[in-house]
Amino acid sequence: MAEFIKIYPENPNPKEIQKVVKVLKNGGLVIYPTDTVYGLGCDITNIRALERVARIKGVKLEKSNFSFVCEDLSNLSDYAKQIDTTTFKILKRALPGAYTFILPGSKNLPNPFKKRKTVGIRVPDSSIALALVNALGNPIVSTSIRDEDEVIEYTTDPELILEKWNNLVDVVIDGGYGGNEASTIIDLSVKPPEIIREGKGSLEIF
């Protein structure tokens, strides 16, 4: 049974944030609000938690397209190869925001992702998501709970999310109604950058 924790986005309660972080550090799975749709996330350093997320999504962990949710761009050098000035300027303009940027992966990627040539980085414009990552001390590996075929109501209403995910995750955060438009995905590992999916993030950053 998942714990249902109310956190107000205007002023996330540090006590509640720490409660969720404790679950993450113990290998738990958390559904949390972002600046787009609600996400399913776990601690990037916990292999068992990563495997649980992969099982739920029906993918092999090594081949998954999960994104790394970071607090800011300071984590970039941990997971991405050195990027040029133009790329960095795009990231600075766009983040925090409703984007997933695909960057060339570095040799420091966590073990399950070692063979990946690229990595998806997110810095959402969401006080709750950023507070979680800050308190955890490292990125959250995340995937959207949105259905690819169509957006249905349960992905925006925390109570309906709890109903559906109650036996699959350890915590569902109620941060209010979520959006139903996913992030814009931009591949910056190629020149010129390639738009993989147009979502909530505006393309006017170029």
Image: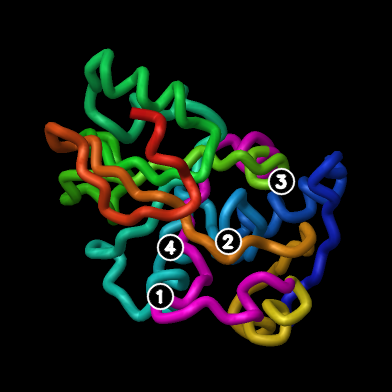
Q: First in sequence: mark 3 or mark 2?
A: 2
Image: magenta residue range: 131-157
Q: Residues within 10 Å of mark 1 (few under 14, many from 20)?
A: few
Q: Residues within 10 Å of mark 3 (few under 14, many from 20)?
A: many
Name the residue that disc number 3 marks: 128
Question: Looking at the figure, which quarter contains the C terminus?
Answer: top left
Q: CA distance from mark 4 to mark 1?
A: 21 Å
Q: Secondary structure at mark 3?
A: helix
Asked if disc 3 and disc 1 are in contact, CB closer than 8 Å, the reply is no
Type of the residue with mark 1: Glu
Q: Nearer the viewer, residue 32 or 45?
A: 32
- Is residue 94 rendered to the left or right of residue 196? right
Give the residue at the far top of this rendering.
85
Name the residue that disc number 4 marks: 50
Q: Residues within 10 Å of mark 4 (few under 14, many from 20)?
A: many
The disc at residue 7 is none
Q: CA distance from mark 4 to mark 3?
A: 21 Å
